[in-house]
Image (cartoon, helix red, strand yellow):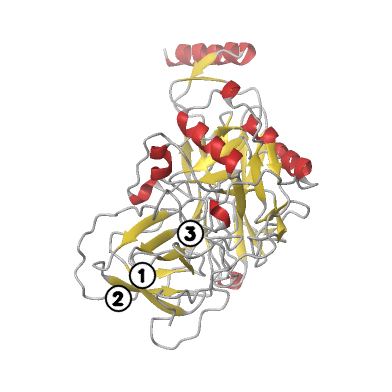
Amino acid sequence: MVKTVSRLLSLALMIAASSGGVFVSTQIGRAQGEHHVVHGATRLPKVAPLSVRAPDLTGAARAGATLTAGTGIWKHHPSHFDYQWMRCDGRGGNCRPIRGATANAFKIRHTFAGMTLRVRLIATNRVGSAASASSMTYRIAAGNAPKPGNGTPSPPGGGSGDAPKGGGGSGSGGSDPAPTTTTTTTPTSTTPTPAPPVSANQWWAASSFWNQPIPAGARLDANSPTWTNMLLANGNVQSIYVNSDYWTINLYHATTATPTASIYVQNTNKHITIPYQAAWKGTPDTDAHLAVIDDSTGCEYEFQGFDANNKSAVGIEINNIQTGSGAHINDSGVGGGALSLLGGLITPQDIASGSINHALRIATPVNSPSYVLPGTVSDGTHPGGIPEGQLLRLDPSLDLTPYNLNPFQKTVAKALQTYGAYDADSGASFTLYTESTFDGSTYSQTPTALPKTLINHLQFLTPLYSNIPLGPDATPRSAQLH
């Protein structure tokens, strides 16, 4: 009986393979470290796998710690995954395979201090194979960060002011310094509270570049067609993606009644005491972004690599959302272009109102090492690519009707036509950002990616500004690093 069933199953699979028909599988392969399961009826793939979202990395970027790589998101039903860990220089370049590091988990060696790591994932199905690489980690720290207040110097290779981000689903490992303690003030609430914009669904000073509609006389950059074609040719760009949970930012609202906590910031080897409640956490990915707005002062504290258990972070940027521009000097900040992580963020209030009254924030996989204002630095690696700080828009004359956009997509598309988006970071895909749902935010309309066909109608503009006020970490009325 078993042999008969086996022969029948084999015959069914042969027929399905020759006709492109349907077959049922309970498991079509095992990835290293996990199962890859297909449920129900699935067509046999006719093309090689295609990466939709690059593999994520989780774990601390510290010697002795273990990093774990996910599989990312793929089309065309890959049945097998192969991993190769690579060691790279401090900016994520000159990567070389690490001999024997071919599992989905990797324990970081002490000899990698000061370097960065990536993982290269090869997905295979019956037709062929394709590769996708993660973003780089932070620079590997030599070991545990110093205990607070003991005067120990910062660990070599610990934090870097230009640490990469994971827009579009690829991330970078954080650090895990020793814990500090909170003050003994009793919290008034442990429920996460999303922070609303201060007024009219806009942050920043009224004169901020984030709040200015693109003027009618704006000119196209000579490289606009080239950059559009670079995006269209990139295999990871399958849409104008929207990060709405992972790889964006958790945002919380503080009042004068909010207790305080001392946070250790690794890449400064200093502490800062800010309003903070124990329930407030970074996003549950290795970027671990968190922002706190002090409503009484307008001061905003945003962190990368935030560790709620140890009250620590890898990097910090301090802004004032009432008086600041939303651009920052290149010091201990957390954004690729040193633009605030709140700059261009789509909020639940934006969507509920049906109108986004500010420019958007975007990341691309083809950013250049160069930058233009309002950017003040770049973590891009593609010579001739898009400079960070670059302003782009959707052609304002484009009729959106034929694209059958849902209400969320239409609201975002109109904002791209009116205000545009600033290239603020490098990511694995072409990505916009909403406030993360992990901070308790809910949206009246589900955040949805915009169709790839709209990329054909993007316009990259010549820089509108030759001088922009830049925020320092010593923002007036804000808490100070000490």
Identify the amino acid type marked 3. Answer: Trp
**Mark 3 and mark 2 in contact (Cβ < 8 Å)?**
no
Dividing the image into 4 quarters, which one contains the C terminus?
bottom left
The residue under label 3 is: 204
Identify the amino acid type marked 2. Answer: Thr
Residue at horizontal 74 percent and vertical 46 percent from the top = 219
User: How crowded is the residue under tag 3: few (<14 C-alpha within 10 Å), some, or many (20+)?
Assistant: many
On screen, 186 above or below 85? below
Q: Is residue 73 visible?
A: no
- Element type where label 3 sits in the image: loop
Marks 1/2: CA–CA distance? 7 Å
The residue under label 1 is: 311
On screen, 217 above or below 464? above
Between 52 and 133, the residue placed more toward the observer is: 52
Position of residue 454 measured from the top left corner of the image (x, y, whole percent): 64, 32
On screen, 233 above or below 182? above
Position of residue 368 measured from the top left corner of the image (x, y, whole percent): 72, 55
**Mark 2 and mark 1 in contact (Cβ < 8 Å)?**
yes
Tell me the quarter of the picture where residue 294 sits.
bottom left
Marks 3/1: CA–CA distance? 27 Å
- Decide which of tag 2 and tag 3 comes sooner along the chain: 2
Position of residue 119 measured from the top left corner of the image (x, y, whole percent): 60, 53
The residue under label 2 is: 181
User: How crowded is the residue under tag 2: few (<14 C-alpha within 10 Å), some, or many (20+)?
Assistant: few
Q: Is 67 displayed left or right of 467 in the figure? A: left
Viewer-side label of 3, 1: 3
Q: Is residue 199 visible?
A: yes
- Decide which of tag 3 and tag 1 comes sooner along the chain: 3
- Decide which of tag 1 and tag 2 comes sooner along the chain: 2
User: How crowded is the residue under tag 1: few (<14 C-alpha within 10 Å), some, or many (20+)?
Assistant: many
Between 422 and 176, the residue placed more toward the observer is: 422
- Element type where label 1 sits in the image: loop
